[in-house]
């Protein structure tokens, strides 16, 4: 306590509005006498749900308060810290953050004001840590030099004596009450009476009540009764459960192009199901993921005026603001090994009101020319299933082969879980292919027809695909195919890839690693587009495109296996700029076993410019296992991280 008649604190509602909002204050009388029981008001604690220790939120808020309240607008150049004594040693580090150095006071009045404000912060900190009987005394003294500070008598650390739940009004069902009682383990008898666990327990109780269908559940301030002789704190959580809610009709507002039945297919609950805030949030998330809306809100209808006990049916309002349904995109890339490339695309979304997308994409580059059209339909048959049909024509021109042709395909993709999806596709194609062996023999291009399928599973555990910072991505695919090239042969291509991302002690530095392997089983004679190639951007930087592939007397050949490993350290130096150091290694091999013993490595540095849509990438790399004919340096410019 602060010697005097009151001790100020911050209301929790003020904290919940954020640092930019006005922080409400409250005052109360408080006196401590050994052997007496007293009421203890709620203490200040941040409600940040992602803080591993709630006290960290307190420190941030108090740091803001301390920096503003203890600063003097007319501060002189000389600065120092207040004299603090008697604070428990484990709080010293907190004090350094909460009470920064400040200007020397110019008057006894200013010194006294600084001391009292510091005492207020100290009192709140001590109480939040369980020192409810602490005596905090500010002082200011005049002399040769003004002195000001705070003397503390911390007293003993209070512990939890008991914890109970009391309902103000009709209680919830017995099984819910039993479940709520189990949540009191966080404030069990004998635990330190710190404010953080107390308010965290209250939050958990309210979340459990909400999840059980009590949409209007609320809590009055925790009743905390302190025993000064035993140094215990008896807690009573005072709750208003309200009426249990079941979900009624859904009203949709703002859907102009979008069909009502398309939105209804995304609703994750059935009529009459018990209210759950997670269900409403799930619908909002699904609406946002369609990309059809600039804004989407999902709200429960207001509670009826009738407050009689029992279950009440309440409708749900969905309010939408539709986005533009046409998009034009333009991109490009450049590298010393692969040349220049330009790609453009056009999309028409939601043309028939069911979220369909019709897209046209064109690529013009040194290595390829391609035109592709596609039509996709989300929620095909059920929510989470995507149907995609596409057709393309292309002309590929690489050192290993030349290919001109086209293909049509159909794919069905299912969202198995929030992060796992699986797909099955079938493709039929025709192409005319020429490789070094054909050209050496003076023959014309080979006519190749193919019928293949792809079964794939992909796990996406990252938030931003263009710039992942934490998480895992993985994909595995099997691609059987029948190919007619004079004779009929069958081959099966297997590929697997995994990437891991993690911050290295600070969000500004991210470590990234990728492994990719592949193998081709089946008869010899597979066309080049079914084989594996390594080297260049997106593979092993520092080497020419496809140059780490098997080499015969006639030139480059595709391999029947692949092995690649990449490591990156990404340092975001500012909001817009970042630096990258990387090492890549890989090779394509002639046998089906991944050629780990044939891998060659490249290393380099890169610059990232973080635009609003994702990072722009520029890398420079050198070969670490340089061979005769390899260039000494390669440069790559593109959009997005390398992986």
Image (cartoon, helix red, strand yellow):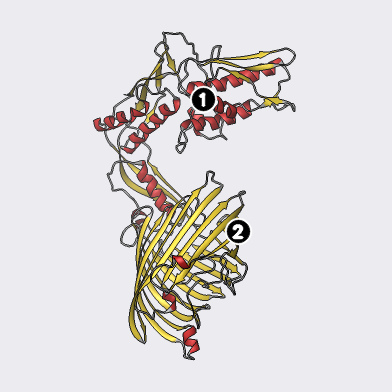
Rendered location of residue 390, percent (x, y): 41, 72
Q: Which mark is residue 76?
A: none
Rendered location of residue 600, percent (x, y): 52, 66
Q: Quadrant of residue 207?
A: top left
Rendered location of residue 174, percent (x, y): 24, 30
Up the image or down, 247 lies above or below 608; here it is: above
Describe residue 113's horizontal placement relative to residue 595 as left or right.
right
Element type where label 1 sits in the image: helix
Q: Residues within 10 Å of mark 2 (few under 14, many from 20)?
A: some
Describe residue 465's horizontal placement relative to residue 110 as left or right.
left
Element type where label 2 sits in the image: strand
The first of marks 1 and 2 along the sequence is 1
Does residue 65 appear in this view? no
Q: To which residue does mark 2 refer?
A: 606
Rendered location of residue 399, percent (x, y): 53, 78
Considering every residue shown, the one lying at the far left of the view is 174
Q: Nearer the viewer, residue 293 or 11?
A: 11
């Amino acid at each position: 306590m602060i010697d005097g008649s009151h001790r100020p604190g911050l209301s929790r509602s003020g904290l919940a509005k954020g640092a930019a909002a006005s922080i409400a204050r409250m005052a109360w009388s408080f006196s401590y006498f050994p052997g007496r029981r007293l009421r203890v008001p709620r203490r200040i604690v941040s409600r940040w749900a992602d803080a591993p220790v709630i006290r960290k939120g307190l420190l941030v808020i108090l740091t803001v308060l301390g920096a503003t309240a203890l600063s003097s607008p007319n501060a002189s150049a000389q600065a120092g810290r207040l004299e603090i004594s008697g604070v428990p040693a484990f709080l010293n580090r907190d004090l350094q953050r909460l009470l920064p150095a400040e200007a020397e006071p110019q008057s006894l009045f200013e010194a006294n004001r600084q001391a009292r404000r510091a005492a207020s912060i100290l009192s709140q900190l001590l109480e939040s840590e369980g020192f409810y009987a602490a005596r905090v005394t500010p002082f200011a003294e005049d002399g040769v030099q003004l002195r000001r500070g705070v003397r503390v008598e911390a007293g003993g650390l209070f512990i939890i004596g008991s914890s109970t739940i009391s309902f103000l009004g009709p209680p919830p069902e017995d099984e819910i009450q039993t479940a709520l009682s189990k949540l009191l383990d966080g404030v069990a008898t004998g635990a330190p009476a710190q404010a953080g666990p107390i308010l965290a327990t209250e939050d958990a109780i309210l979340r459990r009540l909400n999840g059980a269908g009590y949409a209007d559940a609320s809590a009055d301030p925790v009743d905390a009764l302190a025993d000064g002789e035993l140094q215990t704190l008896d807690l009573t959580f005072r709750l208003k459960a309200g009426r249990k809610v079941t979900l009624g009709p859904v009203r949709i507002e703002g859907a102009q192009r979008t069909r009502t039945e398309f939105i209804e297919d995304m609703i994750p609950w059935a009529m009459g199901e018990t209210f759950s805030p997670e269900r409403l949030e799930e619908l909002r998330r699904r609406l946002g993921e369609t990309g059809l809306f600039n804004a989407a809100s999902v709200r429960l209808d207001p509670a009826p005026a009738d407050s009689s006990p029992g279950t009440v049916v309440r409708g749900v309002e969905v309010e939408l603001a539709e986005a533009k349904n046409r998009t034009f995109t333009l991109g490009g890339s450049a590298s010393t090994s692969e040349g220049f490339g330009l790609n453009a695309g056009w999309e028409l979304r939601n043309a028939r009101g069911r979220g369909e997308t019709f897209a046209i994409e064109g690529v013009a580059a040194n290595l390829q020319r391609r035109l592709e059209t596609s039509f996709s339909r989300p929620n095909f048959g059920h929510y989470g299933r995507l149907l995609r049909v596409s057709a393309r024509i292309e002309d590929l021109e690489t050192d290993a082969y030349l290919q001109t042709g086209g293909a049509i395909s159909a794919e069905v993709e299912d969202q198995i879980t929030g992060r796992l999806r699986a797909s099955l596709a079938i493709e039929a194609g025709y192409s005319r292919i020429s490789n070094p062996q054909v050209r050496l023999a003076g023959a014309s291009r080979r006519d190749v027809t193919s019928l293949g399928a792809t079964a794939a599973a992909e796990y996406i555990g990252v938030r931003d695909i263009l710039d992942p910072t934490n998480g895992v991505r993985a994909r595995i695919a099997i691609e059987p195919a029948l190919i007619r090239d004079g004779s009929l042969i069958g081959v099966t291509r297997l590929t697997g890839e995994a990437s891991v991302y993690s911050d290295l002690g600070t969000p500004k530095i991210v470590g990234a690693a990728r492994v990719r392997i592949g193998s081709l089983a089946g008869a010899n004679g597979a066309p080049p587009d079914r084989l594996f190639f390594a080297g260049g951007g997106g593979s092993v930087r520092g080497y020419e495109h496809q140059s780490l592939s098997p080499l015969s007397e006639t030139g480059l050949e595709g391999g029947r296996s692949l092995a690649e490993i990449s490591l990156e350290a990404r340092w975001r130096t500012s909001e817009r700029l970042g630096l990258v150091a990387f090492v890549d290694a890989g090779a394509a091999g002639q046998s089906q076993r991944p050629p780990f013993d044939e891998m060659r490595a490249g290393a380099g540095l890169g610059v990232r410019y973080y635009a609003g849509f994702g990072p722009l990438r520029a890398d420079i790399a050198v070969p670490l296992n340089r061979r005769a004919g390899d260039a000494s340096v390669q440069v790559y410019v593109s959009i997005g991280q390398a992986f």
